[in-house]
Every structure is written in structure tokens, then in C-alpha cells.
Amino acid sequence: MAAERSLPAAEVRGLHDNGLERQVAAFFAEAQRRAEFRRDLPTSWMVATLHALVHAAAVETEAGRLDPAVALDTLATTMLTILTPS
């Protein structure tokens, strides 16, 4: 979060473009291939959405609006709701 406050968005994005992010993208792509996740959303959007929600959970937890004990479950429930085919 500190980087986002002081660095240009492109630079922050470059810092996040690492092996873990590629693994997450591969996981989402495989889940899409198996029709476990929506196929109408680009994998890159799914990765960006996860990244944004992780940051939102951190901000809300830090601000005292999200109980740290339920933050991970809240994040997982939100992502699954977004990604699960209807």
C-alpha cells in the first residue's frame, strides 16, 4: 500500500509481475479450461480483481472495518462469487 501511495501505477504493477502472479494466472486459466471458473472474463482481469480485493481487505482490516479473523474467508467468498459460473 505504501508503494501505491508513492510510485506510478505502472511501476507498482511491474513490481507485482513476479512468479507468484504468473502462478495465479495459470491457476485461473486452468480453472477456466475445466469450466470451474467463468470463461467470459479474461484471466488477466481475474488476477487484477484478486490483487485489488487483497489490497481492499488489507485497507479495511487496517482501518478496523474488517475483522482480521474473517478477512481471508471474506476475500475467498467474494472471489468465488465473482469467478463461479452461473
Image (cartoon, helix red, strand yellow):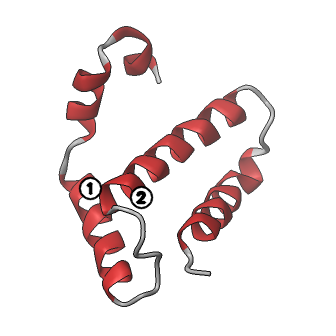
Residue placed farthest to the front in the image?
A: 40
Dot 2: element: helix
Dot 1: element: helix
Residue placed farthest to the top in the image?
A: 6
Residue 39 place in picture, x, y as percent? 40, 76
- What residue is rendered at 47% in x and 50% in y? 49
Residue 59 place in picture, x, y as percent? 63, 30
- State the quadrant of the C terminus: bottom right
Query: Is mark 1 in CB contact (under 8 Å) with mark 2?
Result: no
Q: Quadrant of residue 13?
A: top left
Up/down of 27 relative to 6, above or below = below
Residue 2 place in picture, x, y as percent? 44, 18
- What residue is rendered at 74% in x and 25% in y? 63
Q: Which residue is mark 2?
A: 46
Q: Quadrant of residue 47?
A: bottom left
Give the left or right position of residue 59, taking residue 38 as reference.
Answer: right
- What residue is rendered at 31% in x and 85% in y? 33
For badge 1, the amino acid type reads: Leu
- The residue lying toward the viewer, choosing from 62 and 49, is 49
Give the mark count: 2
Q: Residues within 10 Å of mark 1 (few under 14, many from 20)?
A: few
Up/down of 36 relative to 44, above or below = below
Give the left or right position of residue 64, taking residue 7 as reference.
Answer: right
- What residue is rendered at 29% in x and 73% in y? 29
For badge 2, the amino acid type reads: Met
- State the mark number for residue 20: 1
Q: Residues within 10 Å of mark 2 (few under 14, many from 20)?
A: many
First in sequence: mark 1 vs mark 2 = 1
Frontmost of labels 1 and 2 is 2
Up/down of 18 relative to 26, above or below = above
CA distance separating discs 1 and 2? 14 Å
